[in-house]
Image (spheres, rainbow, N blue to C red):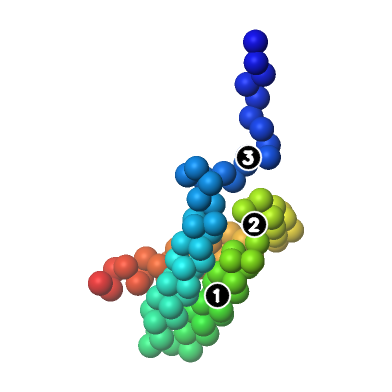
Amino acid sequence: MQNHTEDRSTAGHIDGGNTAGVMAATADALEDAASGIERAGHGMGDRVSDAADRTALALLSGADRVRDMNPRALGADLVHVAKRHPMKAIAAVAAVAFLATRLVSRR
């Protein structure tokens, strides 16, 4: 009888080896989100506009990191940051969700 445990070396294996394509699409989506957040934040007051600009820059930086990293390293990096700064991670997710919702509701 064969051992049916998951091979950890295949973690992150998506769509028959199309991990690079998924990573590129993710980076593109981050860049699109950055543009949308930046546009949505303008005209909403200085504080919101500044927060939108900082969030957009962080997303662009994330897009660059996604392109430069393999999936396993990216996942480990995100977990590490979230564990070190859980409140900042939650705040970042909330800010992105809020701004994305504003962007979608304007259409």
Q: Nearer the viewer, residue 85 or 57?
A: 57
For residue 82, say whether it is visible.
Answer: no
Amino acid at pointer 2: Asn
Between the residue at mark 1 and the residue at mark 2, the CA separation in whole angstroms equals 17 Å
In this view of the protein, which residue sits in the foreground, 80 or 92? 80
Quarter of the image with the C terminus in it: bottom left
Distance from label 1 to label 3 (Cα)? 28 Å
Relative image position of residue 23 (x, y in whole percent): 53, 59
Q: Position of residue 87 (x, y in %)?
A: 64, 60
Q: Which residue is mark 2?
A: 70
Amino acid at dot 3:
Thr
Q: Position of residue 4 (x, y in %)?
A: 63, 21
Q: Depth-wise, is mark 1 or mark 3 nearer the camera?
A: 3
The CA distance from mark 3 to mark 2 is: 12 Å
Secondary structure under tag 1 reads helix
Cβ atoms at labels 3 and 2 below 8 Å apart: no
